[in-house]
Image (cartoon, rainbow, N blue to C red):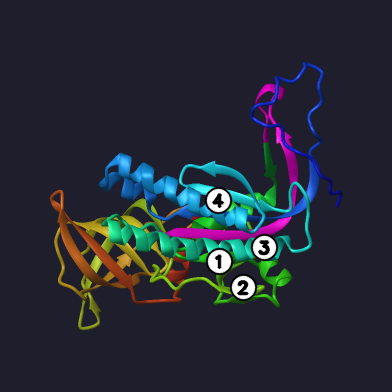
Amino acid sequence: MQQSQWHAPGAMDDAPAPNRESPPVIETKVAIVLADIRGFTSLMASHPPRLMAQLLNRFLTAMCAMVDRYGGHVDKFMGDSVMAVFGVPQARADDLGRALACAAAMQQSMAQLNNDHRRRGEPALYAGVAVNTGAVMAGSFGPAHHQAFTVIGESVNLAARMEGFSLRGQVLISAAVRAQAADRVIVGPANRVQPKGLAEPLALYPLRAVHHGCLLRVPAVEPRRSPRVEVDLDALFHQVRAKRVSSEPLRGRIRDIGYHGLSAELPMPFPRLTELAVRLPETASHPVCGDVYARVLRSVPEAGRYRTSLAITSLDTPAHRALKTLVDERIWRR
């Protein structure tokens, strides 16, 4: 693929002449790193806006410092996330290695940031990070008087989708990254996601460590066991006693769901460890294929109902696989 050097126009450049040509948009290969704060919307709802603005600025400053340290280019900020690319404006042989080192260092920096927050009595921030590599179109886009340098393409889109699957404190890498950096990375078991419309599942690998001059480890964080998505689904709940499912259904609403658990609004409380059979609603893409069995972790009064957290106990059944597919598709559509 063609590669070249150029410089994006600076913010203080004079306004270009009407016939002035933009720098060329080229096809090249890059490594993409995307870091995003997990649960930032919930934090915003429960803490003063001025404090959250300060925390966001600290996060962005720390992430950009790691991008600069490893020679990347900060492409853009998107709310509470930052995207960086390695390979533009000039490609280097170790672009992918530097991107992986940057991703691991981002999570190390988050651990240091949270140490400072704890000393101040401020809330901890957790980031999910994704790394992908592939072909992009790179250059300055937009009208001559308001151009922005960026990269676009399927590799960028995949990195953005991957980031949605990353848990707090986690770095996820794509199968392409793992294949190209196999001798430099230590990874955990893959999460194979099956978005609707794709013939084959995608394998996303949690990065444990990367060799880049020295061994850079991703700090261990007690994460959720899976990504979760907000939903609003009717469901039927049946209590299970002595391995017998009650014939009397209880109608509730599922509010969020993950691979291994869910949160629902129910009209009555249940003691901890009560077993329930949950029948998900039938849809065109998700026909009912049996019940998901789960145990109550806690039940808290909320607006006249009971917000109930449940851990799924019937794993790798047809119903559980349908639930995982539902989660994958919701994340993919974000």
- The residue that disc 4 covers is 64
Q: Sequence-wise, which precedes: disc 2 or disc 1?
A: 1
Q: What residue appears at the point 49 percent right and 66 percent down from the top-left corner?
A: 108
Disc 4 to disc 2, C-alpha distance: 20 Å
Q: Which mark is residue 104?
A: 1
Q: Sequence-wise, which precedes: disc 4 or disc 1?
A: 4
Residue 125 on the magenta segment: no
- Examine the rendered structure and indicate whether residue 95 appears above or below residue 142: below
Q: Residues within 10 Å of mark 3 (few under 14, many from 20)?
A: many
Residue 305: % across, % down? 16, 53
Going by the numbered disc 2, the residue's amino acid type is: Val
Disc 2 to disc 1, C-alpha distance: 7 Å
Q: Are marks 2 and 1 in contact (CB under 8 Å)?
A: yes
Q: Secondary structure at mark 3?
A: helix
Q: Which residues are magenta?
A: 126-148
Q: Residues within 10 Å of mark 1 (few under 14, many from 20)?
A: many
Q: What residue appears at the point 58 percent right and 42 percent down from the top-left corner?
A: 76
Q: Secondary structure at mark 1?
A: helix
